[in-house]
Amino acid sequence: MATWAWILIAVAIAVVVVVLAMMAGQQRRTTVLRRRFGAEYERTVQARDNRRAAEADLRNRQKQRKRLDIRPLAEPTRSRFVDEWRELQGRFVDQPSSTVMAADELVYRVMAERGYPVENFEEPVVLH
């Protein structure tokens, strides 16, 4: 066989290997996103024009989340918030309107204590 034919075969094999590697990498990234986001993955894919755009959106959410300093609550603080929440649940039947406003404020305080940005709710916050 001529040298040019061997070169052509080698190039074709290299192209196939690169394409297969790219497909495997994409499949791995999709699997990681599905595990990470669960049902949110499917909702995002349905809401976007295509899977690629949805996955780019989810990767951007991951990047945003990594920039945040989310921390667990200290046990005394967590207990205090749990007590406040239970107290609000007990008031709800008799005072639903004011209790909902107080619960909203409690959620803001918990989120702020954990490190979530609560100043601007126009931007979505990833809770994963």
Image (cartoon, rainbow, N blue to C red):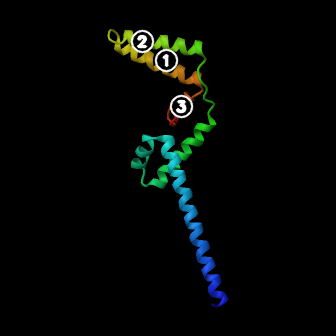
Residue receiving disc 1: 106
Q: Which residue is mark 2?
A: 88
The residue positioned farthest toward the right in the image shown: 3
Q: Which residue is at the front of the view, 110 or 41?
A: 41
Residue lying farthest to the left in this orientation = 93
Q: How far apart are the two marked residues, 2 and 1, measured between alpha carbons?
A: 10 Å
Q: Type of residue at label 2?
A: Leu
Q: Are marks 2 and 1 in contact (CB under 8 Å)?
A: yes
Q: Quadrant of residue 67?
A: top right
Residue found at x 61% / y 38%:
66
Task: Find out whether the residues at labels 3 and 2 contact each other: C-beta distance under 8 Å.
Answer: no
Q: Name the element at disc 1.
A: helix
Q: Give the number of the disc on residue 120.
A: 3
SS category of the residue bearing label 2: helix
> Residue at point 36% right, 15% down?
97
Determine the secondary structure under disc 3: loop
- The amino acid type, in three-letter code, at marker 3 is Asn
Q: Nearer the viewer, residue 96 or 62?
A: 62
CA neighbours of label 2 inside 10 A, class few (<14), some (14 to 19), many (20+): some
